[in-house]
Image: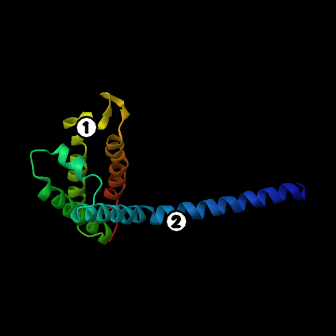
Amino acid sequence: MDSREQSLRGGSSLAARIDEALISLMRLHGARILRLALGVVFVWFGALKIMGRSPVADLVAATVYWVSPTWFVPLLGWWEVVVGLGLLAGIALRLTLLLFWLQLAGTFLVLVLRPDLAFQSGNPLLLTVAGEFVVKNLVLIAAGLVIGSTVRREK
């Protein structure tokens, strides 16, 4: 084996060690960081609703048109803040995740009750901005599944 081969093997060995270290860090801290990030998003979005500054307040009002948005949008905001604080604190995660699932299920109501707001020309493959806002919640659902898988591990 010449020195170039040894250098390449040593380099790939170093790369393998770095790769293992990074994967270990992600495995050790990834779910916790995901929980904290999701908590920040929920507190932030909820606070915007409470302050009357949410860009989706009109969408909420148009979707659940049978309730008054003057009290429902802030109530939804408080709900989201409670979920966010539960995620940030990491306490009562089962209850927090139940509230999380209920809130996310509600976001999909727009697809059923107001498809005119979610789809261009009634085509479910052509999302509007509101439709994209709702469908991206699939990622939040996946994040909730990951967090839920840690309930028994995290203390």
Task: Report how far apart the C-alphas of labels 1 and 2 lie in the structure.
Answer: 38 Å
Report the front residue among 10 and 57.
Answer: 57
Q: Residue at x 24, y 56 (%)?
A: 100
Q: Under tag 2, what secondary structure?
A: helix
Quarter that holds the C terminus: bottom left
Marks 1 and 2 close (CB-CB < 8 Å): no
Q: Residue at x 13, y 44 (%)?
A: 65
Q: Which mark is residue 90?
A: none
Q: Please state which amino acid type lies under the numbered disc 2.
A: Leu
Image location of residue 147, percent across then percent down: 34, 58
Q: Residue at x 34, y 42 (%)?
A: 135
Q: Which mark is residue 25?
A: 2
- Mark 1 nearby-residue class (10 Å; few <14, some 14–19, many ≥20): some
Rendered image quadrant of residue 38: bottom left
Q: Under tag 1, what secondary structure?
A: helix
Q: Please state which amino acid type lies under the numbered disc 1.
A: Leu
> Is the residue 129 above or below the residue 126 in the image?
below
Give the side of residue 134 with respect to residue 74, left or right: right
Q: Residue at x 30, y 37 (%)?
A: 118
Image location of residue 115, percent across then percent down: 25, 34
Q: Which mark is residue 111?
A: 1
Report the front residue among 78 and 122.
Answer: 122
